[in-house]
Amino acid sequence: MAWNKNWGEEVEGKELAYDLRQSYAKLVGEIMIRARDFLVERNYEDWFEELDCLYIHISMKLRKEDKVEYNGMLITLNYLIREHPRAYHDKSGKNVNMGSNNIYSQLKKIHMWLFLKMEESDIFGSKAEEEDW
């Protein structure tokens, strides 16, 4: 038995696992919301930090090939950041130039890729069976 601090009583391992899944889902959801907010603000530095945090939390669900693909996207992003550091570090979202657009495109690619991998791994939850009407 494990102690569940939410209700102050002992619970079986199955119930604790459910509580942990709920906490994990909440954490991942909060990261996704912050990433979306930084995307809208065009705050590239903080957007990437949230995406990288998301990657860390879902990486155990990824295949080796997925991790290699992610690293390739990071190499491209790092190249763009070195080429356009002012655009990357500008938190105002006002430094719009070709470098900014390239960084935005790469971050968007990473963002969409992470969501695709989450969908493929059923991190959003499995789809309910359609009922016959």
Image (cartoon, grey):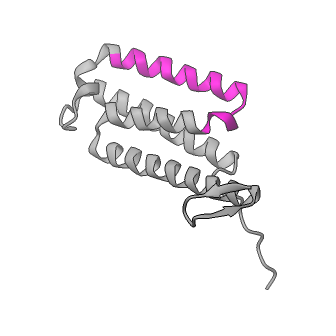
In which quadrant is the N terminus drawn? bottom right
Q: How many marks?
A: 0
Q: Which residues are magenta?
A: 58-81
List x then y, in percent, for residue 43: 28, 37
Q: Is residue 59 part of the magenta span, yes or no? A: yes
Is any part of residue 109 visible from this angle? no
Q: Is residue 90 part of the magenta span, yes or no? A: no
Residue drawn at point x = 48 percent, y = 35 percent: 53
Quarter location, residue 39 = top left
Horizontally, residue 85 falls left or right of residue 20, namely left
Residue drawn at point x = 69 percent, y = 51 percent: 122
Residue drawn at point x = 46 percent, y = 36 percent: 51
The extreme bottom residue here reads: 133
List x then y, in percent, for residue 113: 56, 38
List x then y, in percent, for residue 109: 49, 35
In this rendering, the answer to whether 47 lies above or below 16 is above
Nearest to the observer: residue 29 or residue 91: 29
Is any part of residue 104 visible from this angle? yes
Nearest to the observer: residue 58 or residue 63: 58
List x then y, in percent, for residue 19: 63, 58
In this rendering, the answer to whether 12 lies above or below 43 is below
In which quadrant is the C terminus drawn? bottom right
Secondary structure of the magenta portion, mostly? helix
